[in-house]
Amino acid sequence: MDLADIITEYRLQADDNATPPRISDETLALWASEAERETCERGDLILDDSETDDVTVFAISADQATIDLDPVTRKIISAQFTSSAGGRAKNLSLTGFDRISDLDDWRTDSCSRPDCIAQLSPTQARLYPIPNTAGTLRLTIYRLPMYDMEDDSDEPEIPFQYHRDLVQWLLYKTYSSKDDEIEDAARSKIAYDTFEARFGKRHNARVQRKHYQRYRVTTRPI
């Protein structure tokens, strides 16, 4: 489904085909993009296996400990470091910052290739030990959509089988309106509950922060 199809499905379910409609196409486009982001926040539906270089490939300088991630990054799934000095690419262990910060001299330890990576937040990660040679870091991540949907022909990046479910978010936003002629708490709740049943609950910032601090999927001891 493209954006035009999603809006058409919405207007059918909301019985909003008048001229002019209650909710404009422009507003529905904004809500559809918001809905797609919500699905990724809740369900991690877009896997990027080093396919989008601007987001997943990083030139690492010697003695560089931290990496600024693109804001669309949700979660690092795997990481690989290749030294500019040559040699085979090294798969890094994924761990939590709490594990690194428990180690002696973690702020200064260095080696030719790091052993692990910890995601500190959606926008930053840290290598350990600090690489003392330059190299290239490649990530596999779950991410948010790269762009909002604006044109009728734009399609969601999430898998096709979830496209129609985005309509539930549009219905939720509609019936949550403060316009007395549109607001309908019961229908708003039904739409939201349907969306949540499909994509899961949204974790708050505190839960997400604890996840990054304690995230440990190590394949070897540090």
Image (cartoon, rainbow, N blue to C red):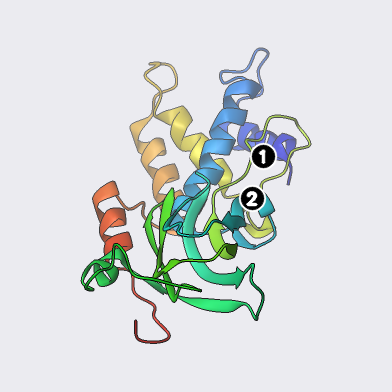
16 to 110, vertically: above or below = above
CA–CA distance between discs 2 and 1? 8 Å
Q: Label 2 neighbourhood size at 10 Å, few (<14), some (14-19), many (20+)?
A: many
State whether residue 15 appears in this view: no
Q: Position of residue 35 (x, y in %)?
A: 52, 41
Q: Residue furthest right?
A: 153
Label 1 sits on a secondary structure element that is helix
Q: Secondary structure at mark 2?
A: loop
The picture places residue 82, in percent across and down from the top left corner, at: 61, 71
Q: How many marks?
A: 2
Dot 2 and dot 1 residues touching (CB under 8 Å):
yes
Q: Is residue 130 above or below residue 155?
A: below
Identify whether 75 is placed above or below 91.
Answer: above
Q: Residue at x 57, y 42 (%)?
A: 167
Q: Amino acid at mark 1?
A: Ile
Q: Please provide percent x and percent y for residue 173.
A: 45, 32
In the image: residue 94, left or right of residue 19: left
Q: Quadrant of the C terminus?
A: bottom left
100 or 84, which lies in front? Answer: 84
Q: Residue at x 48, y 63 (%)?
A: 76
Q: Earlier in the sequence, mark 2 or mark 1?
A: 1
What residue would you read off at disc 1? 6
Q: Amino acid at mark 2?
A: His
Q: In this rendering, does residue 164 appear at all?
A: yes
Residue at (59, 37) in percent of width and height = 13
Where is residue 199 shown, x and y percent of the image? Answer: 47, 57
> Which of 56/87 is in front?
87
Label 1 environment density (alpha carbons within 10 Å; few <14, some 14–19, many ≥20): many
Q: Nearer the viewer, residue 68 or 82?
A: 82
Q: Which mark is residue 163?
A: 2
Of the pair 13 and 161, the residue shown nearer to us = 161
Q: Is residue 174 above or below residue 80?
A: above
